[in-house]
Image (cartoon, rainbow, N blue to C red):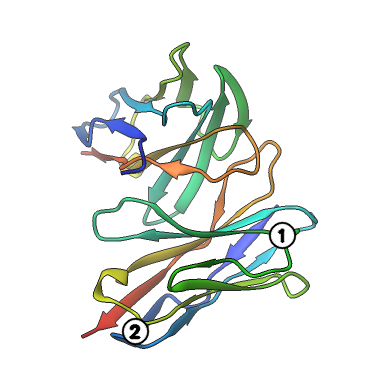
Amino acid sequence: DSGVTQTPKHLITATGQRVTLRCSPRSGDLSVYWYQQSLDQGLQFLIQYYNGEERAKGNILERFSAQQFPDLHSELNLSSLELGDSALYFCASNRQGAYLTQYFGPGTRLTVL
Amino acid sequence: AQTVTQSQPEMSVQEAETVTLSCTYDTSESDYYLFWYKQPPSRQMILVIRQEAYKQQNATENRFSVNFQKAAKSFSLKISDSQLGDAAMYFCAYYGGGADGLTFGKGTHLIIQP
């Protein structure tokens, strides 16, 4: 158990819908990272937040957005969902923004029908 | 942009034997971190080992060790005394710091033959 929690574990929805994925980092960790794992694209970095502020952006679509709240939990919002958004979405956290090991949550499996 | 290449989509090894998984990367940075993560069928991403580029000594964690060749930009993982529980996908990852996340290779599926 990494100490990072993600909810829900599984999510099934339809095309065009909007969903929210939630992540709670390890106690004391200020940075949260979001990754997408799909068969086509492999593991891709989406976005990073540090202590409530956006720190880095990767291959995140404009239909996707994220935020980090004062209690440091983070949410990833996916809208206008397409079949290709079906993937495993991971959240990871670490103590500070740079150079330290990222610990991954168990992931949220999103299926878009 | 950094790239990470794992040239072995699948490897098979007999239980108790030693296996080496390959990883090469491309970067223009001089200071960075490299990681091996394990993803068993449960899909959980588990850190196996990490290496700081400024350290010449290769990292070791119990049965897992790396061969880090900075000039060749190579970072292989050696698993000694392979166990059935080592069966998983193994991902090599690069982190250069700054405004970025981890860059992953496509993974190597490790099969352990009993």
Residue beneath the point at 46% across and 71% down? B64
Q: Is residue B44 above or below residue A77?
A: below
Host chain of mark 2 = B
**Front in this rendered view, residue A63 or B55:** B55
Residue B95 position in % (x across, y down): 63, 50
- Disc 2 from disc 1: Cα separation: 29 Å
* Residue B53, disc: 1
**Residue name at image x 42 percent, y 85 percent:** B18
Which label belongs to residue B12? 2
Name the spot of residue A5 as percent of width and height, x first.
Answer: 32, 32
How many other residues sit within 10 Å of disc 2, few (<14), some (14-19) or many (≥20)? few
| Element under disc 1 | loop
Query: Which chain hosts label 1?
Result: B
Residue B53 image offset from top left, x and y in percent: 71, 59
Q: Residue at 22% across / 36% down in the picture?
A: A9
Q: Are marks 2 and 1 on the same chain?
A: yes
**In the orientation shown, which residue stands out farthest toward the top?**
A70
Which amino acid type corresponds to the residue marked 1 in the rendered image? Answer: Ala
In depth, the one of B18 and A16 nearer the eye is B18
Between residue B63 and residue B91, name the one nearer to us: B63
Residue type at the position of mark 2: Ser
Circle 1: is it few (<14), some (14-19), or many (20+) Cα within 10 Å? Answer: some
Which SS class for mark 2?
Answer: strand
Query: Looking at the rendering, which quadrant does residue A25 occupy?
Result: top left
Q: Residue furthest front?
A: B62
**Of circles 2 and 1, which is in front?**
1
**Quadrant of image for the C terminus of chain B:** bottom left
In the rendered image, residue B11, in percent from the top left (x then y), is placed at: 39, 81
